[in-house]
Image (tube, rainbow, N blue to C red):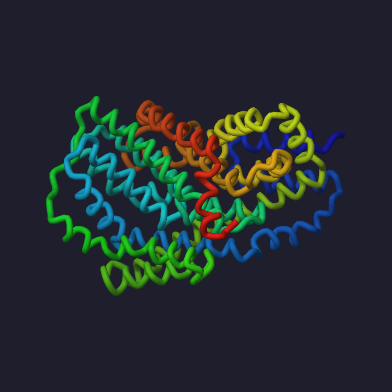
Amino acid sequence: MDPTIPFIFIFLTLIGIGVPIAICMGVTALGVAWYMDLGVQMFSYNFFANIAKFPLLAIPFFILAGILMERSGIAERLVTFIRECMGSITGGMAIAAVTVTTFWGALSGSGPATVAALGVILIPGMVRAGYDKAFSTAVISVSSGLAIIIPPSIGFIIYAVLTSVSVGGMFAAGIIPGIVMALCLIVSIFFTSRKRGWRGEPRRQNLLKSMLKAGWALCSPVIILGGIYGGIFTPTEAAAVAVFYSLFVGVFVYRKIGPRELYEILRSTVASSGIVMLLITCGGLYAWVSSTIGMIDRLSGMIMGLSDKGWVVMIVINIMLLIMGMLIDGASLYYVFTPVLWPVIQHFGWDPVWFGVVMTMNIAIGGVTPPVAGNLFLGARIAGLTMEEVTPWIIPLVIASVVSLIIVCAFPATATFLPRLWGLM
């Protein structure tokens, strides 16, 4: 029997009955390896090899840094400052929300973590300002996807490890596309707010005073990203620096983190990091088995056989990623599709850094498109709404996100300009 048949059957069956995607990939790989006698004893070696990579050390550090910044009060002060900047312009609070999530993306690297950190502050604040609760939830859920595009990004780290491109190059490549997506969201929000008559709030305090209060938050991305691009430390070392900076601010400056809070922070970090690392190891086993049985070569050949025109294949790939993003979480998409798409990238001579940004933008959009929609689910849960109540408000924001994706696809320089300027590719 062709091994790709049981491979696909087991994987789809497990997904269909609701098994977590990491377990789906691991069990599928183990089952097919045993059936094809590929050497199950190799699994322990592969399991270790998948996580024993220096760049992956950045993931738990960035997760810890994000939680520390949330619990230390940095998020609250940052929201206050940006809200004061917006004043009473049309859609001011909603535009401030996008600005905050964009800025927070330079601190977190995770979409769900951004929803969790900012949703509890911004959603009630927008509702008090007169915005519809479902709309407020939609804005936070969609804009939080910017966290995996604006560096540092956990998604970029995973893609860089899979393709052996520079992590720093990927981080630099995400800056302009992230800003483009944020601007597209702001335009959509502005027209929706003007139609509904939603405005911002008059300033409650002196702008300079609120900026000084948010000073530690505003300095954090300068330290993290400036250190990386200034050649002071690597992205992995930057993650450790972010942890110590956040810990210093939370313990000694804002004094919101004590022994009890630190224990809870570490416990949350271990749980979140464990989930990501399990996904990485199982995803690596899945990719190894699928490559060994020849499934990757077949799928890659099918995609390349669709057309000899690169732009046609790119459209098909984007549609495929957008659809699969509705069904599979982002980190899993990297492990399922990157090995398949890598030969396609090489065949058409696409820049792998640019393609990584395109793929990540698709994953960001997938984070708010039902039925899976991790960001949307978490945002709705924070707001006390159902996904069905929020989904209609998602549509114009998703359209704006797709517009930004089209811009980056049509103009690769949006992703490659900064890495080349800074000598990172």
Q: Nearer the viewer, residue 226 or 267?
A: 226
| Position above or below: 279 against 397 | below
Farthest-out residue, bottom: 252
Image coords of residue 174 (percent x, y): 49, 49
Image coords of residue 409 (percent x, y): 55, 36
Image coords of residue 367 (percent x, y): 48, 39
Q: Nearer the viewer, residue 37 or 418?
A: 418
Is 407 on the left or on the right of 143, as rendered?
Answer: right
Q: Residue at x 32, y 49 (%)?
A: 100
Q: How many marks?
A: 0
| Position above or below: 384 against 73 | above
Q: Quadrant of the C terminus?
A: bottom right
| Residue 54, quarter of the rendered image | bottom right
Q: Nearer the viewer, residue 135 or 16?
A: 135
Is 150 on the left or on the right of 125, as rendered?
Answer: right
Is 11 on the left or on the right of 279, as rendered?
Answer: right
Q: Residue at x 44, y 43 (%)?
A: 145
| Residue 302, quarter of the rendered image | top right
| Position above or below: 259 against 283 | below
Q: Quadrant of the N terminus?
A: top right
Q: Residue at x 72, y 27 (%)?
A: 306
Q: Residue at x 54, y 35 (%)?
A: 410
Image coords of residue 101 (percent x, y): 36, 48
